[in-house]
Image (cartoon, rainbow, N blue to C red):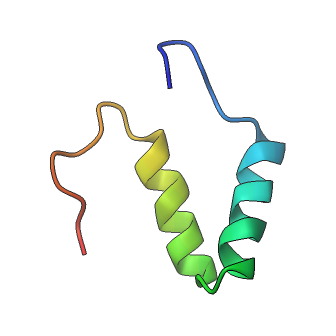
Amino acid sequence: MKDGDSMTATEAARLIEWLEAHGHTAQEATECIKYIAAYPAPATPSK
């Protein structure tokens, strides 16, 4: 995302639905949203 870009609540909800539909847990979906929202992004994602 560019500076100033943001994800709407609707977009976040749709992403969560998509992730869950593709076998991810609600927890994984939440972690995905948190990772995307972090700026700057962590050098290495935690596992």
In the picture as drawn, the residue positioned furthest to the right comes out as 10
The quadrant holding residue 29 is bottom right
In the picture as drawn, the residue positioned furthest to the top comes out as 4
Nearer to the camera, 26 or 1: 1
Q: Is residue 36 left or right of residue 45?
A: right
Task: State the residue at coordinates (67%, 35%).
Answer: 7
x and y, in percent, of residue 38 in the image:
39, 40
Compared to residue 14, the image places residue 43 above or below, namely above
Task: State the residue at coordinates (59%, 82%).
Answer: 24
Q: How many numbered circles are shown? A: 0
The quadrant holding residue 41 is top left
Q: Is residue 18 left or right of residue 25?
A: right
The quadrant holding residue 15 is bottom right
Compared to residue 38, the image places residue 15 above or below, namely below
Q: Is residue 18 left or right of residue 35?
A: right
x and y, in percent, of residue 3 in the image:
47, 13
Task: State the residue at coordinates (23%, 67%).
Answer: 46
For the C terminus, give its image quadrant.
Answer: bottom left
Task: State the residue at coordinates (71%, 50%).
Answer: 12
In the picture as drawn, the residue positioned furthest to the front comes out as 22
x and y, in percent, of residue 36 in the image:
47, 45
Compared to residue 47, the image places residue 4 above or below, namely above
Compared to residue 3, the image places residue 7 above or below, namely below
